[in-house]
Amino acid sequence: MPINLNNKKIVPGKWLLFVLAIFVFQMALAQTKDTVSNPIRLNQLGFYPNAIKKAIVLNRVGVGNFSIVNLNKHIVFSGTLKASASPSFAGKTTYIADFSNFKKPGAYRLYIDGVVSYSFWIKNDVHAKVANAVIKAYYFMRASTPLTEKFAGKWNRAEGHPDNKVLIHPSAASEKRPAGTIISSPRGWYDAGDYNKYIVNSGISTSTLLSLYEDFPVHMNSVKLNIPESGNGLPDVLNEVLWNLRWMLTMQDPNDGGVYHKLTNAAFDKFEMPDKGTEARYVVQKGTAATLDFAAVMALASRIMSRFPKQVPGLADSCLIAAKSAWLWAQNNPNIAYRQDEINKKYTPAITTGGYGDNNFTDEFIWAAAELFVTTDDVAYLKNINLLPDDKMPVPSWAQVKLLGYYALVKNANGKTINDLPEIKKRLLNTADDLINGVDDNAYQTSMTLSPKHFGWGSNSDAANEGVLLLQAYKLSHDKKYLNNALADLDYILGRNATGYSYVTGYGSKTPMNPHHRPSASDGIIDPVPGLLVGGPNPGMQDGIKVPSKVPDEAYIDDTRAYAANEVTINWNAPMAYLANAIEALQHELSVPIKSGSTK
Ligand SMILES: [Ca+2]
Ligand SMILES: [Ca+2]
């Protein structure tokens, strides 16, 4: 029953208590500037009217009542906390405030015992802005172009790394392109906090954005990014993808189809703006992983771009030709790993930028074969591929792309005979079930917080990739438990977590201010470049920067030096872009299960 704090019918004897309550409430409101961590953890952007709405309350003893108050401080909903059945990784019971049954659009705060949460919205399209921003982030990562004020606002900057004179490194020398040959390889996205461009990481990132378009074309046609190409008749997400795709195409040696592992400085640039980085740039050794990732992306791009023959004439054909010649190269060179240490023993200059080394290409073969098969309908691509080499189902990462192949097959296999497809579908659903098994007992009520194993380097991208996997399971089964738990993973990233951060720069009440990102650190602007997902909790501390807690989901620090917890990268933003935009696209399919909620 809603209670109005301004209700005049209060018995005289209770006036003192009432005035005290108001005072405490006002004090609490005044304290929500995030100098201290707010003990109420929730999605800081908000909730869809008809979806599950949960907050997690920390630092208390025992259950009690909570209220939802509007910005006029009127109580509009009350409920009872529920203690978590399982403790958090820190060993503490948490208290769950479920206000799913409150559905009225508006701006609110959660209030409990003198503490209020950050304000949040209940409304349709509640993630539209962040979903847009995490794609727009790629524009801010563009190499070889100035970012103008019209599109970049206060983060406008000069052009960096034109990459029109790139040297063939001795490790990449071939008969037709000896060491020192100059090639042109402009455009592309900077990989991360640094200014280099790596094919393996570009592969998973570009394909995730292309898949977002493939899976939600109607919704993605409506997403406008305000980038230089906007309005040219191509959806903006594809316009942004093209900036990187055109660079990737230049990374293939036209003489043999092999793809260079990366385009890089010999050593990382200093922490300076992109235009200050003028060191020599190289392409290095061709490799099997890079070439197969390239083949997969180009095959996928071909079938997406074929829908736009007027806007990008000939591009679909070019992508498919590139994919096929890369595939052939990999058939002839099935086991060429990029081993930077060994290369540095043989050649100069030594290359000390990100290695992205991978020794197992089983997954890359599966992915490339799957995308080529789907695009061409030619079963020959699957002929010598064991689609089920093991029973592991890891969420995708740059070195492990098997599930990207499975996703492509499952969603595009209508009517096609693939012997292993029923088993792949079964494993996908089983994996989704494993991801959410026990989530109702969990301290934060998310798949991400069910296992400490989820908290390695770039844990936030695993949270997003878990959400993506759950969305694939939802598309396959239409079971809403998967959709609801994908939303919970988004809630996790945006604030319902053990640190109280919304991990996307610029989106939330408490967000990272000091990402390990050269432009953000050197542009003289206080706010970091917006829309970047930071790596997140990682007790590994590979950067040597001490995190305030080694509890898995608390092991985070907002420190520019902390590249193991606070870097940004294109392959972390990509699943976030998929998750946030897919949830926006599916928002009207979200609903509150009957058992959920506790109105008092
Ligand atoms: Ca691999
Ligand atoms: Ca800055």
Image (cartoon, rainbow, N blue to C red):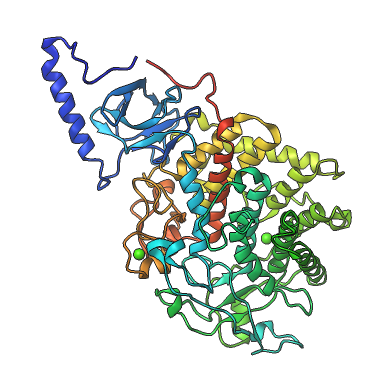
Q: Position of residue 379 (x, y in %)?
A: 88, 53
Quadrant containing the C terminus is top left
Asked if residue 386 shows in the view, the reply is no
Q: Position of residue 21 (x, y in %)?
A: 18, 24
Query: At 21% from the left edge and 30% from the top edge, which residue is drawn?
Result: 25
Q: Nearer the viewer, residue 440 or 68?
A: 68
Query: At 39% from the left edge and 26% from the top edge, which residue is drawn?
Result: 83
Q: Is residue 230 above or below residue 407?
A: below
Q: Is residue 355 above or below residue 278?
A: above
Q: Quadrant of residue 3?
A: top left
Query: At 71% from the left edge and 59% from the top edge, which residue is drawn?
Result: 301
Q: Position of residue 57 (x, y in %)?
A: 35, 33
Ligand 2 visible in quadrant: bottom left
Q: Nearer the viewer, residue 415 or 231?
A: 231
Q: Position of residue 43 (x, y in %)?
A: 42, 39
Query: At 66% from the left edge and 89% from the top edge, which residue is drawn?
Result: 181
Residue 457 left/right relative to 174? left
Asked if residue 329 shows in the view, the reply is yes
Q: Is residue 569 above or below residue 122?
A: below
